């Protein structure tokens, strides 16, 4: 068996065997297969696809490429949550504290930004001192004590995914169903939670643009999780425009804090309650959806979720002062309004372009070794359905470099589409998949 032969096989559209997939994944992790050959394989998979059996084999090989975390020392049913990636997606920062404040242990492994989408760890690092490099013992200890801990993907957990994720990010091979399903589920299986709630995004800012494809991805991941003995549920949510208004890193943390204070955007709140409901049901904390929803809303109203967020930040070395004084989070030096080109209703926002605009400002990575600027970002002022007069602000850019701001401005301007007639609101939660 040799890698060149496997690339030819996949390029020609044939299915790889379990042994071939294991050979490829093990060889890549050991450094025996170079990045350039794996990049060619990823592109071949991107174009030729993988069948269900190949996807399951790939997931299993990636999950077993490193340690399988044993979380049995954590009391209670551990529930994990994962998003397939979107623009302005700060859900974990709000949802984690909400659910943890109700006593459900959350041992979450999160990632960094990928392509035009942001990552929870990058966002949290805009809080001074916050870190996610916990040992497994510290991680377990924090979950038992605080009920919430977020760890970066360590070198020992699904190392195959860690290497592949970074490679796919810079070789235009992210948005493939089998690659996304295996990437997410390998980490989730290796991270040891008892139940997994997936937030599968759909629309112009998601990796899966069409609802039909998002449903297939959701079904594939639910099938992989349940067959591995983990209760898995997927919620399909809209990503045809950014979630909430803030897109960036520190700016998203600020919006998450606002939400924990009960002043959050309606779509973000709805998503947190929907995902949280499934988490509480999986954990056996609520008997019905209505009961779970009420419990979750209460955590915002009574301040328990905000308090839990502060506890969690402090347990991971972060400065809690910025939670009560968000203006102390990193701030960009230049503020620029983007003017509406037309008078009318916002018909559509090409969501991926807003993510790219944030990346161009320095909020994301173009190459895997890039450092990101946590202070930059975009605050949308108008979303789909809103009315705007020509020249009014549709978004505010926060940046540090005039050239980058110019690029971002053009992207945002082009991402907005206008209509002379009122625009109907679309359903935000598209469905829940349990099997
Ligand atoms: N999130 C992941 O963890 N992996 C992907 O491939 C895409 C989104």
Image (cartoon, helix red, strand yellow):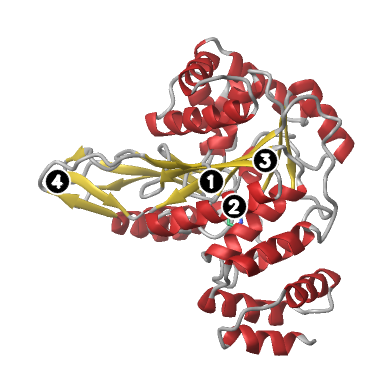
Residue carrying label 4: 343
Label 1 and label 3: CA atoms lie apart by 36 Å
Disc 4 under 8 Å from ligand 1? The reply is: no
Quadrant of the rendered structure where residue 78 is? top right
Q: Secondary structure at mark 2?
A: helix
Q: Secondary structure at mark 1?
A: loop
Question: How many numbered marks, from 0 up?
Answer: 4
Q: In this rendering, which labeled residue sits more in front, label 4 or label 2? A: 2
User: In this rendering, is residue 323 above or below 133?
Assistant: above
- Mark sitting on residue 223: 2
Mark 4 and mark 2 lie on one chain; the one further toward the N terminus is: 2
Mark 1 and mark 4 lie on one chain; the one further toward the N terminus is: 4
Q: Quadrant of the N terminus?
A: bottom right
Mark 3 and mark 2 lie on one chain; the one further toward the N terminus is: 3
Residues under numbered marks 1 and 2 in contact, where contact means CB atoms less than 8 Å apart:
yes
Nearer the observer, 9 or 117? 9
User: In this rendering, is residue 181 above or below 97?
Assistant: below
Label 3 and label 2: CA atoms lie apart by 33 Å
User: In this rendering, is residue 165 above or below 339?
Assistant: below
Q: Residue furthest left?
A: 420
Residues under numbered marks 1 and 3 in contact, where contact means CB atoms less than 8 Å apart:
no
Q: Position of residue 6 (x, y in %)?
A: 70, 85
Label 4 and label 2: CA atoms lie apart by 47 Å
Mark 1 and mark 3 lie on one chain; the one further toward the N terminus is: 3
- Mark sitting on residue 435: 1
Q: Badge 3: few (under 14), some or many (20 or more) residues near its Cα, within 10 Å? A: some
Q: Badge 1: few (under 14), some or many (20 or more) residues near its Cα, within 10 Å? A: some
Label 1 and label 2: CA atoms lie apart by 7 Å
């Amino acid at each position: 068996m040799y890698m060149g032969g496997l690339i030819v096989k996949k390029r020609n559209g044939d299915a790889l065997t379990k042994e071939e997939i294991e050979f490829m994944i093990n060889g890549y992790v050991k450094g025996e297969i170079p990045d350039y050959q794996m990049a060619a394989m990823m592109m071949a998979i991107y174009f030729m696809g993988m069948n269900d059996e190949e996807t399951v084999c790939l997931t299993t090989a990636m999950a077993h490429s490193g340690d399988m975390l044993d979380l049995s020392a954590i009391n209670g049913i551990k529930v994990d949550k994962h998003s397939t990636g979107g623009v302005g997606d700060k859900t974990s920062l709000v949802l984690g504290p909400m659910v943890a404040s109700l006593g459900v242990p959350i041992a979450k492994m999160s990632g960094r930004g990928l392509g035009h989408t942001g990552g929870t760890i990058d966002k949290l690092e805009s809080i001074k001192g916050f870190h996610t490099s916990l040992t497994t013992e510290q991680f377990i200890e924090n979950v038992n004590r605080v009920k919430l801990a977020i760890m970066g993907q360590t070198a020992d957990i699904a190392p195959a995914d860690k290497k592949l994720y970074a490679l796919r990010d810079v070789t235009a091979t992210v948005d493939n169903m089998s690659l996304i399903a295996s990437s997410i589920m390998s980490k989730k299986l290796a991270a040891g939670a008892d139940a997994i709630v997936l937030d599968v995004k759909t629309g112009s800012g998601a990796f899966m643009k069409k609802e039909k494809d998002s449903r297939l991805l959701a079904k594939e991941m639910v099938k992989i999780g349940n067959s591995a003995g983990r209760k898995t549920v997927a919620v399909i949510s809209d990503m045809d425009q950014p979630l909430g208004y803030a897109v960036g890193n520190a700016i998203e943390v600020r919006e998450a804090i606002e939400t924990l204070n009960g002043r959050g955007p309606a779509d973000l709140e709805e998503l947190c309650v929907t995902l949280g409901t499934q988490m509480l049901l999986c954990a056996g904390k609520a008997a019905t959806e209505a009961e779970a929803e009420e419990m979750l809303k209460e955590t915002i109203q009574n301040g328990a979720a905000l308090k839990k967020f502060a506890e969690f930040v402090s347990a991971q070395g972060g400065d809690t002062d910025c939670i009560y004084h968000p203006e102390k989070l990193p701030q960009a030096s230049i503020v620029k309004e983007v003017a509406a080109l037309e008078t009318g209703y916002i018909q559509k926002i090409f969501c991926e372009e807003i993510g790219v605009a944030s990346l161009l400002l320095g909020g994301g990575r173009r190459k895997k070794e890039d450092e990101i600027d946590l202070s930059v970002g975009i605050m949308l002022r108008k979303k789909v359905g809103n009315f705007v007069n020509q020249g009014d602000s549709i978004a505010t850019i926060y940046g540090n470099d005039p050239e980058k701001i110019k690029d971002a401005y053009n992207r945002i301007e082009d991402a907005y589409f206008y209509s002379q007639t009122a625009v109907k609101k679309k359903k935000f939660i598209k469905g829940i998949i349990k099997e």
